[in-house]
Image (tube, rainbow, N blue to C red):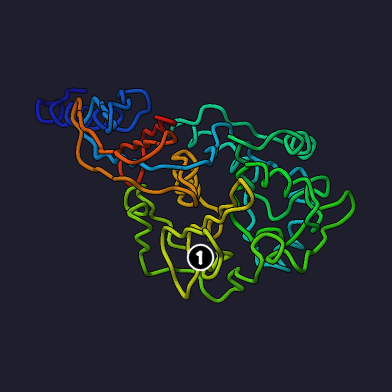
């Protein structure tokens, strides 16, 4: 078969386009980095990218709070056993719990959290016996096991939070259920246990249309998930911080102090966009205790050097750099600068 010159040219062009797409979107084809150091009354930072990309550098003071450096993701082994009951009772949207946990690990890794672990109920009980400082727990299930939470203020979970642990809850009403070996148990006063008042969205409102400035954190972290099912209304909760999007008083991201630790609730059903926002918040180290110093944004092509004035701030300054905008491809938090 004879192939004429125009056909050959067309084939070559198509291959060039396909190869170009592969280069552009394949992981590992580009390099990124971020460094920062304290220099007197400023933090000097350097951001590097081998391809032109937007970036954000968020500097904040976390006071006495120890942002989590190690993350545990609870993979509920009884998830499917009680799932239908949770769906009927609370309107939970089922997920592939194993895939969800794997996605969280991958996304956290791309944003600088390399120390993340998927754990089952027995490993979770062991975690609760440890000091919670610098540790975070991500819950993708609708319930926790009785060994750490049974709807009582003396539960191991609350001790762990009081001592500095951070709890991140996705995809359902926080603390509404716990599981035993035989059943799913409803906790009627779950909201009062965690927040001292009823504040969880009871349903009817999901899509949020108002952007919360949140001291610039909504834009600075490139948050995009605007769902508020199961979300909190933080009005009247001392020390709480709301960021993301809001509708009827409910916020897509709510951070509430608990002793020396924090409870962070994300609104909406679990999906990739929620995982993306949640891992951005977790990896950044942002908390309800964070005082934003300054946020700088721009475009990096090779290397950007800049600095942020930190005069008057203490020694627990964090700089979180993310590259890629609303679909972050690189992130790194530099702690205690």
| Of the pair 322 and 225, the residue shown nearer to us | 322
Q: In the image, what residue occupies the spot 36% across and 54% down?
A: 218
Q: Quadrant of the C terminus?
A: top left
Residue 196 in the image, given as x and y percentages of width and height? 66, 66
Q: Quadrant of the N terminus?
A: top left
Q: Secondary structure at mark 1?
A: loop
80 relative to 131, above or below: below
| Of the pair 197 and 16, the residue shown nearer to us | 197
Residue 34 appears in the figure: no
Q: Residues within 10 Å of mark 1 (few under 14, many from 20)?
A: many
* Quarter of the figure with residue 199: bottom right
34 relative to 154, above or below: above
Pointer 1: what residue? 228
Q: In the image, what residue occupies the spot 24% across and 40% down?
A: 54
Residue 203 appears in the figure: yes
- The answer to whether residue 314 is left or right of residue 230 is left
Q: Residue furthest front?
A: 312
- The answer to whether residue 9 is left or right of residue 196 is left
246 relative to 271, above or below: below
Q: In the image, what residue occupies the spot 51% across and 74% down?
A: 205
Residue 188 in the image, given as x and y percentages of width and height? 77, 69
Please count the marks in the image.
1
Residue 46 in the image, given as x and y percentages of width and height? 26, 27
| Of the pair 316 and 327, the residue shown nearer to us | 316
Q: In the image, what residue occupies the spot 74% across and 57% down?
A: 83
Residue 326 in the image, given as x and y percentages of width and height? 34, 47
Q: Residue furthest left?
A: 5
* Quarter of the figure with residue 229: bottom right
């Amino acid at each position: 078969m004879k192939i004429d010159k125009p056909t050959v040219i067309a084939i070559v062009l198509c291959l060039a386009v396909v190869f170009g797409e592969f280069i552009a979107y394949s992981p590992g084809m580009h390099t990124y980095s971020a460094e920062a150091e304290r220099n007197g009354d400023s933090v000097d930072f350097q951001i590097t990218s081998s391809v032109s990309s937007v970036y954000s550098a968020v500097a904040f003071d976390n006071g006495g709070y120890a942002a989590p450096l190690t993350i545990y993701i609870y993979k509920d082994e009884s998830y499917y056993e009680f799932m239908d009951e949770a769906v009927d009772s609370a309107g939970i949207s089922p997920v592939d719990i194993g895939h969800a946990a794997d996605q969280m690990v991958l996304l956290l890794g791309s944003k600088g959290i390399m120390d993340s672990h998927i754990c089952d109920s027995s490993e979770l009980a062991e975690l609760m016996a440890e000091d919670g400082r610098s540790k975070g727990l991500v819950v993708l299930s609708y319930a926790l096991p009785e060994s750490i939470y049974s709807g009582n203020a003396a539960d191991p979970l609350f001790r762990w939070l009081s001592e500095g642990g951070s709890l991140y809850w996705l995809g359902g009403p926080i603390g509404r259920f716990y599981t035993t070996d035989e059943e799913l148990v409803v906790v009627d006063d779950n909201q009062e246990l965690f927040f001292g008042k009823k504040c969880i969205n009871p349903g009817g409102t999901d899509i949020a249309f108002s952007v919360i400035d949140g001291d610039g954190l909504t834009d600075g972290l490139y948050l995009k998930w605007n769902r508020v099912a199961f979300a909190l209304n933080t009005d009247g909760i001392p020390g709480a911080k709301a960021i993301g999007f809001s509708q009827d008083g409910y916020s897509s991201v709510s951070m509430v102090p608990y002793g020396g630790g924090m409870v962070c609730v994300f609104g909406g059903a679990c999906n990739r966009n929620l995982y993306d926002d949640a891992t951005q918040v977790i990896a950044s180290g942002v908390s309800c205790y964070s005082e934003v110093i300054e946020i700088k944004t721009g475009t990096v092509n090779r290397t950007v050097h800049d600095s942020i004035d930190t005069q008057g701030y203490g020694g627990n300054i964090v700089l979180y750099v993310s590259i890629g905008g609303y679909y972050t491809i690189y992130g790194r938090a530099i702690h205690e600068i």
